Amino acid sequence: MTISDMESEAHELFVAYLENELSSSEREIFERKLNEDSKFEAEFLEFKNIYVILENKLSPERASVLETIKQANSNFNYKPLKVTTEKTEKKVIKFKPWKYGIAASILLAIGIFIFNNFSKPTYSDFATQETISLTVRSDVDETSKNAELSFNSADYAKALIHFNELLEVEPNNLQLQYYKAVALVELSEYDEADSLLKKISESNSVYASKAKWINALSYLKQKRYKETKKVANSITSSDPEYQKAQKLLSKL
């Protein structure tokens, strides 16, 4: 067995341990080896750091990473491996090669994925919602007050309820539609938000440019970078959001 094969088997064992796919007796053997073999422990801790990132920070894209690994493995004539955890205990652990792959594929796929995603801007980098004012009139109704208060305190779920109530009375009010769309984006209700923002951005309203900007941020939040660029590029130099859009584009 080559050194490369031994490394591949060790990494697959690491994955099985981290994914809780070892039996109790197998885990006991593995943990005993960690305690007794400092080199093995060091290799495991290094590998674990990668999987902590994958598990905790890239969980929404986990399936994509594993699919990337699977595709990378198709370039290899890979055969299922059997790993004996100790010479004195002939306990054989079977693995699913399509899920784990060889160590080189795992590290390469995860490394590329992390670079591509962590080098991109995020929604939180740009989403600073303005304070709204719906209560400039002395005779303003209670629903408007509640909508304003909820939105300005970032309680978007409640704000959405109040915006819907107000829009039942004024269905064509673009200001209310715009603030509703912002709340929807914050709540990750993208389909309705994007549809509403597109409609507003195509209007002659003062909210048209604002709607384009929030639409770009909505796509950014969804990691739909192609659509983000398209909408951001539609914001012209005469629009107040132009500089923000250019900054976003420079980071994509």
Image: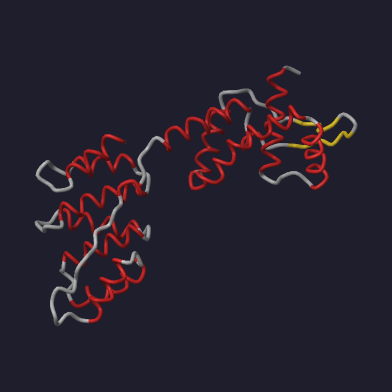
Q: Quadrant of the N terminus?
A: top right
Residue at the spot x=32%, y=57% of the render? 185
Q: Left or right: where does residue 14 sit relative to residue 142?
A: right
Q: Quadrant of residue 89?
A: top right
Q: Is residue 132 above or below residue 165?
A: above
Q: Quadrant of the C terminus?
A: top left
Residue 119, how many percent across, how many down?
Answer: 39, 35
Q: Nearer the viewer, residue 145 or 234?
A: 145
Residue 194, how many percent across, how many down?
Answer: 28, 55
Residue 49, how many percent across, how many down?
Answer: 60, 37
Q: Is residue 157 above or below residue 249?
A: below
Q: Nearer the viewer, residue 98 or 212?
A: 212
Q: Left or right: where does residue 120 sit relative to residue 200?
A: right
Residue at the spot x=60%, y=23% of the render? 76
Residue at the spot x=17%, y=54% of the render? 201
Looking at this view, name the residue that lies furthest to the right: 88
Residue at the spot x=14%, y=48% of the render? 240
